[in-house]
Image (spheres, grey):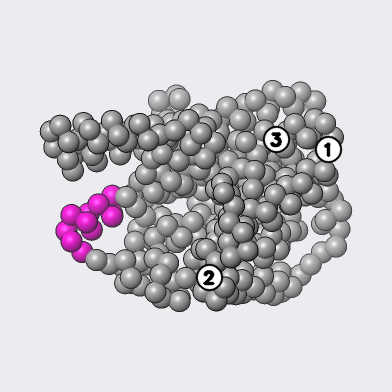
Amino acid sequence: MTRNYAIDYIKFYSIFAVVVIHTFPLDHLAGFYMLDALSRFAVPFFFMSSGYLFGRKITRLKSNEAYFIKYVMKLLSIYALWFLFYCTYDICVLLITHHGKGAIDDILHYLDNIELLDLLYYGKGTSGYQLWFLPALVWSIFILYIFFRLKKVSLLIVASLMLNLAGLLGQSYTMFFKMPVPTRDALFFGLFYCTLGFFIASHKEKIIQKVISMKIFVLLFSCFAVLQVIEAFFLDRKLSGSHGEYFISTIFLTSCLFIFVLQYNQHGKHLFVTKIGADSLGIYVIHVFFLNLVNLYLQSTGLKMSENFIWSLFETIFVFFISFYVYRMMQSAKKKAGI
């Protein structure tokens, strides 16, 4: 199977967008808010590309069950490792910032607050708040595989779309009805985009028959990106909805990007940004650690830089590239150790 370099190319912009979301402040400045809203294509693209690559692989294997188990176990091992990492980091911070009996009490309280549902499904409980993506992906792939074995993926894509639209009531459409459960999860968020990616993988040949020019893609992407920003701003600032992490327009924006990577699958083949995009998962899991360290430094020095654009830009670039290079060093060390 020929490698699709365009996926890694778009993953670069997606992972950079994730870092932007986590470093730039939301409130007060409209420019920051619009930048956050524009960046919300990132995680849906990760889900969709995961579903697509899973679909391309599993539909070509006779013994697909073995691949499914291997794939899920790999994701679970990554999640377990980084959950323990952030848990250890949090305990170390409590020990350093608190002293004596107070530190022990805080640590026990911290550990007591980690609930089983958060651990196994929502991926919450530590300062590594971005880890929610991994259990969401595992559960999405698990459900998707069941429907694949039942030959009911077409049914799942309709059902998951309905769930995704319902999940908007827990996001930016809370002025109509507020969902009583979090909707940034597998069922309401990840499942639809994973299934859509899988569905696209199954119908790739039909999708790429009609070639769309690069100019048309740029125009479509620009239109859908502006639409997403307008939707986010209008719902949050004009209709008193909640700040959303995905929108109706996100479906069109992400689908547009994915059709692009199918038709121009060698785009970005020799670019450095494409190599970075190939390590997007590593950057994703580690970047919050460096962001936390920066925030700890700012707190200890009393500096207030959160609404300074130059600082936010510097922080984003610094956290992004140090995450990339540290992750590459970790991978290199693993190879040398034969792990």
Query: Residue at image x 83%, y 48%?
Result: 203
Picture disc at residue 75: none
Task: Sort mark 1 into few (<14), some (14-19) or many (20+) by Cα contacts within 10 Å.
Answer: few
Mark 1 or mark 2, earlier in chain: 1
Q: CA distance from mark 1 to mark 2?
A: 39 Å
Residue at x 54% of width, y 44% of height: 133
Question: 7 or 298, which lies in front?
Answer: 298
Q: Amino acid at mark 2?
A: Ser
Any magenta on residue 215? no
Per the rendered image, the range of residues in magenta is 293-303
**Tag 3 residue:** 143
Sequence-wise, the earlier of marks 2 and 3 is 3
Circle nearer the N terminus (3, 1):
3
To which residue does mark 1 refer? 152
Q: Amino acid at mark 3?
A: Ile
Image quadrant in which the N terminus is located: top right
Q: Secondary structure at mark 2?
A: loop
Residue at which label 2 appears: 240
Crowding around mark 2 (Cα neighbors within 10 Å: few <14, some 14 to 19, many 20+) is some
Point out residue 257 in the picture as x, y percentages from the top left corner.
67, 61
Q: Residue at x 74, y 52 (%)?
A: 162
- Foreground: disc 1 or disc 2: 2
Q: Please state the horizontal and vertical placement of residue 204, each as a whole percent of the image.
A: 81, 50
Whether residue 48 can be seen here: no
Given contact means CB atoms under 8 Å apart, are the residues at marks 1 and 2 in contact? Answer: no
Q: Is residue 337 left or right of residue 1?
A: left
